[in-house]
Image (tube, rainbow, N blue to C red):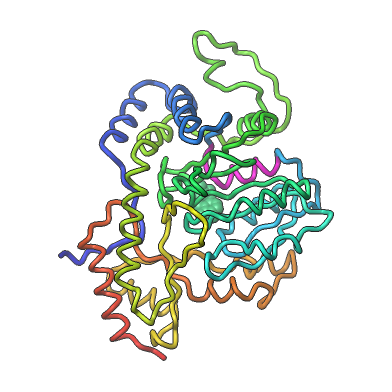
Amino acid sequence: MSNEFLPFSRPSISQAAIDEVVDCLKSGWITTGPRVAKFTEALQTYFDAPYVLPLMSATTGLHLALLAMNLEPGDEVITTPLTFAATLNTIVLAGGKPVLVDIDPHTLNMDMNLLEAAITDRTRVLLPVHFAGLPVDLDPLYQLAKHRGLRVLEDAAHAIGTEYKGKRIGSFGDTQVFSFHPNKNMTTGEGGCIVTRDAQLAEQVARLRFHGVDRQAWNRYGKSGNQDYEIVLPGYKSNMTDIQAAIGIHQLNELPGFIARRNELADRYHEALSDWLQWTLPKRPDFEHLHSWHIYTPLINAEVAGMDRDAFISAMKDKNVGTGLHYRAVHLYPYYRQAFGFNEGDFPLAENVCERIVSLPLFPLMTDAEHDKVLDVMYTVFNENKTI
Ligand SMILES: *Cc1c(COP(=O)(O)O)cnc(C)c1O
């Protein structure tokens, strides 16, 4: 097979989505309009949720949802150190203080046993992240939230298609944010959405995402629309466009197929790598779930492998195989050290994982031959590139 560079992720864009984008461009309406309305309805049906708000990104979704939860300066939001920086950045941008609990080293999700001890009288929101598309154990989390009067905002950026005990993430609970970035389970180019069962939160986000206007633009400019509007607060500009929604409408239909292929590829890695001592493979919890396998993330055992994670990533790249790093520990970035006094050793299990974790190539269009190539190249790298 060819020796072209194999990326760790690549979006699957169908001809139907391309045609819909072209139709949208030719229609004369390219910003928020009928296609966003159609995509919104499709998402409401998919999630069986009363309120879905498509947005420019999941980052803006986390930000606006936290603003709509009315954080006061110093209010605490509890989350995990094993996440993308946006999870913590948006807590700070919304006026909150990020409080972290270490991870369960098996599931790589927030350790439920540490959660209760992290709650103080300033805690307002629990913000779990469904890492890699494996659901957080939500029953005990929601029980705790109810008992302590806390809101729950699920960072479900990895988890469209994930199920917890037979229910889709987004189909129950308080509020969820999904990402449609090109590397995620489905895409709109850039984009995301908030799903909620809280009418007031939905209404507030609808204003915040569009200048603080109480009505959508296409109502104002359409034939039946009313040109007049009120500004009820100083809002942002976070609305999704019809060009994005044109892609999303088709991606959502194709999502079950994407998730099925992601599961096949993850199972294939699992089988092939189960006796490689260089890796500690992802583990699954006992509760019933459907993993969406947004990323397949083994941990390198550097002593056995003869190289650390960074050396592995660079050796793979030299042999034309891209891998991902999800993530470096967020609390150790300069801003978080300086602003909140985080340090090495604060969350030792997450720090250990963040030193060893690698995302192997996994995307629905990946062929079995490409999958075999990744395994072959890894085999070669482990034999040829020992540095320790
Ligand atoms: C990708 C991601 C985000 C941000 O999503 P965008 O749509 O790129 O803004 C937030 N949290 C996590 C865990 C992510 O992986």
Q: Is residue 59 above or below residue 355?
A: above
Can you tell which quarter of the image residue 380 is in? bottom left
Where residue 113 sits, quadrant-wise, is: bottom right
Q: Quadrant of residue 367?
A: bottom left
Q: Which residues are magenta?
A: 55-67
Q: Position of residue 345 (x, y in %)?
A: 67, 78
Instruction: Give the dominant element type of the magenta stretch: helix, strand or loop.
Output: helix
Q: Give the residue drawn at x 80%, y 46%.
A: 72
Above/below status of 20 relative to 257: above
Q: Is residue 338 left or right of residue 227?
A: right
On the image, the x and y values in percent for residue 310 come to 44, 77
The outermost residue toward the bottom is 388
Q: Is residue 261 left or right of residue 285?
A: left
Q: Is residue 259 left or right of residue 157?
A: left
x, y percent for residue 81: 62, 64
Q: Residue at x 57, y 62 (%)?
A: 109
Query: Residue 267 lies in magenta, yes or no?
Result: no
Which residue is nearer to you in this view: 176 or 334?
176
Residue 232 x/y as whole percent: 73, 25
Which residue is rendered at x = 70% and y = 61% of the image? 115
Q: Residue furthest top?
A: 224
Which residue is depicted at the point 74% across and 65% down? 340
Looking at the rendered image, the quarter that the C terminus falls into is: bottom left
Lateral position of residue 134 relative to residue 269, left or right: right
